[in-house]
Amino acid sequence: MALNLSQKQEVVAELAEVAAKAHSLVAAEYAGTTVEQMTAMRKKARESGVYLKVVKNTLAARAVAGTEFEVVKDALAGPLLYAFSTEEPGAAGRLIKEFAKSNDKLKAKVVSVEGKLLPAAHVEVLASLPTREQALAMLARVLAEPAAMFARAVKAVADKQGGGEAPAEAASA
């Protein structure tokens, strides 16, 4: 279905707004993907904070102009599905990687993070990035480790100096 000029402008404006806020972009070839597979992918995208859109490459190129994803303009060719990670950088990579396992027609073609155009193989690296919750858990472990080490050192010193006798003296008094 052909879009008129005002519809194209709306699509470009919507895509530009998403691109301005997104953390990463994965563009994938989707030719041969069934409607059921696309519906499942769209549902999973909504749940994981990924903006998923099939749009003409010329409109996508106009939309990413002036954003950090402008570097992908020359790599946009063929029918592409655009996945923008809006909440965490690895979400789009995980989505495309997950659905590519069960659909050999879905292939990452363009990956962009922080204004850099990366080879399609970097979708694996992007997918392996920790989620926000995982990153916070790792940070909490790193921050708690010095306190735990200090507590173990204090306990070792107390045990070495006979800290275990203090409760026995308190019980006899």
Image: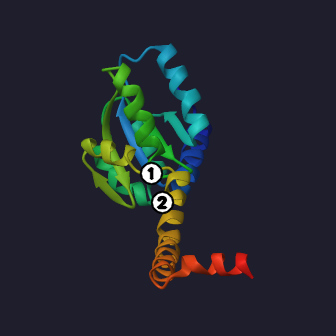
Q: Nearer the viewer, residue 77 or 38?
A: 38
Is residue 78 shown above or below 16? Answer: above
Is residue 101 shown above or below 75? Answer: above
Q: Nearer the viewer, residue 148 or 116?
A: 148
Q: Residue 33 sits in which quadrant?
A: top left
At 34% from the left edge and 50% from the top edge, which residue is drawn?
A: 72
Q: Residue 160 sits in which quadrant?
A: bottom left
Which mark, residue 97? none
| Residue 16 image point, x, y percent | 54, 51
Q: SS of the residue at dot 2?
A: helix
| Colour style of the rendered protein structure | rainbow
Q: Is residue 1 visible?
A: no
Name which residue type carries label 2: Met
At 45% from the left edge and 35% from the top edge, which residue is drawn?
A: 95
Is residue 90 shown above or below 145? Answer: above
Decide if residue 1 is on the left or right side of residue 101.
right
Q: SS of the residue at dot 1?
A: loop
Q: Nearer the viewer, residue 172 or 75?
A: 172
Q: Could you give the CA–CA distance between mark 1 and mark 2, rounded to whole angstroms?
A: 9 Å
Q: Which residue has dot 1 on it?
A: 130
N-terminal of the pair, mark 1 or mark 2, is 1
| Residue 84 image point, x, y percent | 49, 45
- Packing grade of label 2 (10 A; few <14, some 14-19, many >=20) is few
Q: Which residue has dot 2 on it?
A: 138
Q: Residue furthest front?
A: 172
